[in-house]
Amino acid sequence: MKSKASQALAIAVLWRAGRNVGFHSQYLGQAIPDDALEEATHHKQALIEAGYAAELVQWRADDLQGMCDELGRGRYDLVFNASSLPEVAFLEAAGVPICGSGVDLVALDKAARKKLWVFHGVSTAPFVVIDADSRASGHVVPISRIGEAWQPQPPLAFPIFVKPVCGRNSSGITDDSIVEDAASLARQAGLIIERIGQGALCESYLIGREVTVGVIGDPPQVLPPLEIEYNQARANTFEHKKDNEILHCPARISSEAMQRVRETALAAFHAVGARDFARVDMIVAGDGRPTVLELNTFPGLQILTGDEEHLHASYIGTMAMSIGWNRASVVRAIVEAARRRYADRLDPAGGGPKT
C-alpha cells in the first residue's frame, strides 16, 4: 500500500538533451539519435504509476536563475534523475533535494573512484591515466611519453582496455579499445584526448564473464546480477548496447561466486558513498573472483513498453523484472530512499515541504 506521503510528493524529472549520446557523438563525429526526452518521459510515467505527482523539467544551463526559481522555490519536493555533474552541483548549491548520489561522488572520475576502491580493499583492475601533455600532472602520463619503447609498469600489463576517464554509456569505446602494444595504446588514447577532450583510462584487460549489478534503495538492496554475453563484438560498445547483447539474469555463475559478486557490489557502492541507486560493473574470473570495473551513478532504469522509438532496454530494468518488479517499483525504491534522507525537510505525514 502506498503511503500518504508517497502519494503527495511533487517530483521534477530533470532532463538534458544529449545526456546519453553527447560524448559518443563527439567521438564518432556524427549525430546519434537522442533518447533523453524519451527516457525522462519513461521516468515521469513510472513516477505517476508509483503514486507521485511528476512533471518534466528541461535543464537550461544558460538560465540558472530561472532554474533556481523553477526548482528551488517549493513547487517541487524532490528532483529525480539529475543526470550529470553541472546539474547535481547546481541543485546541491541551491539546496534542492535530489534523488541519487551527490556531487562528492559524481565529480569523481573513474580513476579517482578506482583509487577509493583500492583503499577500501575492493578489487579493481590495475590502471594508468593518459592525457594531453598540457593537462598531465602527478601520476597522469603525458601522451607524448607513449612511444614504441614504452611499457606499462607492473601490475599493469598488455593487453590494455582504453576508455574515456569520464565517459558514460560506452562513449568512446570500440572493438579497437583492446590494445596489445604501445603504438595501439597511443592511438586509442590519442583519439579520446583529441575527440572528447579528456584523459584516457587504461586498465588491464580482464578475461572472464562481464557481470553488472544494480544496487537500489535504502537500505541498499542488491538486485540479481546480470551477465552480458557479447554478440560477435569484442567490447560492450555504444552500438552493442542497443539491444545487441545476449543477457542472462541471473548471471551464469556458481552460488558461491554469486554471493561474492553481491558482496563486492555492495562494498563498491559503500566505498564511494553512492546513494539511492547505482550499477556496479565487474568481471568475474573463472575461479569466481569478481573485479570491479566501474560504478555508474546514473544507470538506465527503463523497462520498455513497446512504444519506444530510440530507448533501449536497461540492465537494471532487466534485473528488476527478474524479481517481479515493474517500473513503478524501481522508481519508488529510489524516491523513498531519498525521501528518508530529507526527512527533516519533507513532512513524513503529509509529503510536502514543512512550513
Image (cartoon, rainbow, N blue to C red):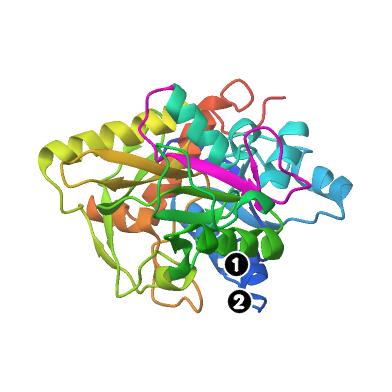
| Classed neighbour count for the residue bearing mark 2: other residues with Cα under 10 Å, few (<14), some (14–19), many (≥20) | some
Q: CA distance from mark 1 to mark 2?
A: 8 Å
Q: Residues within 10 Å of mark 1 (few under 14, many from 20)?
A: many
Q: State yes or no: residue 132 in magenta.
A: yes
Name the residue beneath numbered marker 2. Answer: 32
Expressed as whole percent of the image width and height from the top left, the position of residue 10 reads 61, 44
Residue at point 65% right, 38% down?
107
Compared across the picture, whether 225 is left or right of 39 comes to left
State the residue in front, 310 or 238. Answer: 238
Kindly identify which numbered label has been placed on residue 24. Answer: 1
- Would residue 278 be visible to someone looking at this image? yes
Q: Which one is earlier in the sequence, the residue at label 1 or at label 2?
A: 1
Q: Which residues are magenta?
A: 120-143
Relative to 30, does residue 345 appear above or below in the rendering? above
Residues tagged 1 and 2 counted as in contact (Cβ below 8 A): yes
Residue at 44% across, 61% down: 179
Front position in the image: 240 or 183: 183
Q: Quadrant of the N terminus?
A: top left
Amino acid type at mark 2 = Ile
